[in-house]
Amino acid sequence: MFRAPAIFVSHGAPTFALEPGLLGSRLTELGRRLASATAIVVVSPHWQTCGIRVTGAAWPETIHDFGGFPPPLYSLTYPSPGLPALAAETASMLIDSGFAAMVDAERGYDHGTWVPLRYLRPDADTPVIQVSMPHNLDAAGALRLGKALAPLRDRGVAVVGSGSLTHNLHEVRRAGESAAYAKAFAAWSREAVLSGHVDALVDYRRLAPSAIRAHPTEEHYLPLLVAVGAARGDTPMAIDGGITYGVLAMDSYAWGVA
């Protein structure tokens, strides 16, 4: 059985769907290694719920959960099939791991899922389910969530945490003065990921430089901890993504692809 990878992908702003930058083609190259995956499970910060919900629709819709962006963004779709049976099994697995979880038969894919998947699997030919983030999730909980999802990899299901390595949208228009702190935070995160310093990643808000500035709220960093938890100690690979808008670090990581 193909053991699928664990991945953290920075999706940055919704405009990433139209502006591939450095990362887009690199995700497409990585996505070729997902051709044998039976499905993809994505945890995105743009679906936060009480407890955990899992998309159970056979054909989830594409949700354009943003406003004020270029009109072409709103015509994009990602017509990947869902996989209701896997959704039910995933919810059951999460319950067994101590999470409150249920299947949501109506929910579609938010942009934290479909934007990066447009590069990872541009043909939308692999079934996808999305797992929500609990409102009260913290770094330790995100790591535990990833560990709960990790057994799916042994069944050929890729586990993807979709977030952003830095995510202070208030500073997008102050790019010139802000890039230095974003680079420093991204460099610290890279060293911690590649060195396997999981405890440091969990305690990033105390240990990382400019952590609060890089993430005024935690939700976009937590998917990295989900991916680390799902990695099960596999060797990480860094995927350079550069920095968009001066402050959004787009570096991404994959485990189990060597």
Image (cartoon, helix red, strand yellow):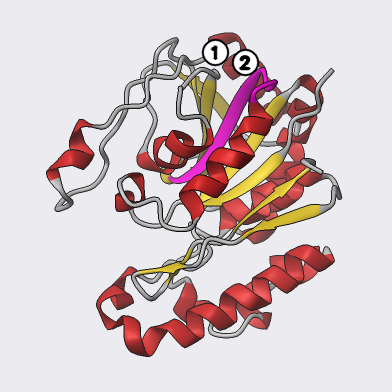
Residue 9 appears in the rendering: yes
Residue 218, relative to residue 146: is it above or below?
Answer: below
Quarter of the image that includes the C terminus = top right
Q: Are marks 2 and 1 in contact (CB under 8 Å)?
A: yes
Quarter of the image that includes the N terminus = top right
Q: Nearer the viewer, residue 189 or 246?
A: 246
For disc 2, the marked residue is 86
Is 62 one of the magenta-colored residues? no
- Which residue occupies 37% across, 26% down? 78
Residue 231, relative to residue 245: is it above or below?
Answer: above
Q: Nearer the viewer, residue 230 or 255?
A: 255
Is 40 one of the magenta-colored residues? yes
- Which residue occupies 47% across, 35% down? 117
Mark 1 lies on a secondary structure that is loop
Q: Which residues fall within the magenta stretch?
A: 35-45
Residue 91 falls left or right of residue 236: left
Residue 48 falls left or right of residue 43: left
Residue 141 appears in the rendering: no
Residue 53: where, in percent of width, then height? 50, 30
| Rendered image: mark on residue 224 | none
Mark 2 lies on a secondary structure that is helix
Residue 256, relative to residue 215: is it above or below?
Answer: above
Q: Amino acid at mark 1?
A: Leu
Q: How many angstroms separate mark 2 from mark 1 (CA)?
A: 5 Å
Q: How many marks?
A: 2
Q: Amino acid at mark 2?
A: Leu
For disc 1, the marked residue is 83
Mark 2 crowdedness (10 Å alpha carbons): few <14, some 14-19, many ≥20: many
Residue 30: where, in percent of width, then height? 63, 40
The image quadrant of residue 80 is top left
Residue 111: where, in percent of width, then height? 36, 41
Residue 168: where, in percent of width, then height? 38, 71
